[in-house]
Amino acid sequence: STRLLPKMTITSNTCKDLAALAELQSRVDKMALDKDLRDWADDACLDRYLRARSYNVDKAEAMLAGSLKWRREFGTHKLLGEYMQDVQSEGAVGKMYVHGKDNMGRPVIYMKPRLDQQKGTQVQQMRHLVYTLERAISMMENGVEKFVLLIDFNGYSLRNAPSISTQRETLSILQNQYPERLGLAVCYCAPFLFNQSFKLIKPFIDPVTAAKLAFVSEKEKVTYFSTHFPVSCLERDYSGDDPTEYNPAQYFAHTPAIVA
């Protein structure tokens, strides 16, 4: 696979502990990794794992080793090949996709649970999730490391709500395999039903992650979205001016390359 964008430059201005980064680099150099995983574990990646573990090299190494193992076992390198049929099947109705960026240049992942009427297996759902995360990352310009989740709960019900197991695995992937990637998670029009299930998974949410959650009501829509997103590339349902509607054929026809 091919990296589309330049690697993020790491300097003393962007890394709080260059000595810790150098030590983690030396440990990674001794790992038996194929080219894809070695390309994936670049300086910016290592710095994210260090930040996630407060620059404790041992803890960052353990977390990184877990992610390297997970990426191979999960098969991130198969998302554009063997697993693409699952990804496209799950992506047929537009329940989750990447579109536009916020005011900070962070790619926006739209999530619309109400459209998830016919769920695939949890494995298929996670392949679609990881494809979407990787697609968002591939859209980041140099200097941007985070994405935004815009979760639209309009029409959310027991019928289309993801299982607690799916919610927990999604949370685990975001926290453990994509550290320092979530910039903001906007929960729009979250109903009582979601609030109840949220209580069940809240104990598993890292406090740093929890601090990135924003609950926005219908009344707050115009003010909130116009403050955080350029209206020109925000969908009309969220007070934006972008008339684009999700089209799976067009969306998957422009699938970018992803790394490892």
Image (spheres, rainbow, N blue to C red):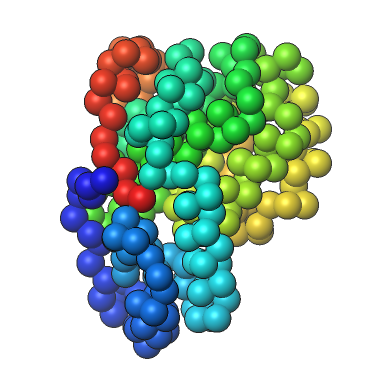
Q: In this view of the protein, which residue sits in the foreground, 200 or 215?
A: 200
Identify the residue at image location x=69%, y=42%. Answer: 168
- In the visual, does 238 lie left or right of 248? right
Question: Measured from the top left, where is residue 61 in percent x and y?
Answer: 51, 74
Residue 105 visible to an observer of this rendering: no
Question: Measured from the top left, where is residue 138 in percent x and y?
Answer: 30, 43
Residue 165 visible to an observer of this rendering: yes
Identify the residue at image location x=35%, y=34%. Answer: 80
Up/down of 49 relative to 93, above or below? below
Q: Residue 98 sits in which quadrant?
A: top left
- In the visual, does 87 lie left or right of 37? right
Q: Count the marks: how many?
A: 0
Q: Residue 133 sits in which quadrant?
A: top left
Up/down of 35 relative to 47, above or below? above
Q: In this view of the protein, which residue sits in the foreground, 23 or 113?
A: 23
- In the visual, does 190 lie left or right of 179? right
Question: Measured from the top left, where is residue 248 in percent x and y?
Answer: 37, 15
Up/down of 8 relative to 116, above or below? below
Q: In this view of the protein, which residue sits in the foreground, 97 or 130?
A: 130
Identify the residue at image location x=60%, y=21%. Answer: 120
Question: Measured from the top left, where is residue 37 in percent x and y?
Answer: 36, 59
Identify the residue at image location x=51%, y=34%. Answer: 127
Up/down of 26 relative to 122, above or below? below
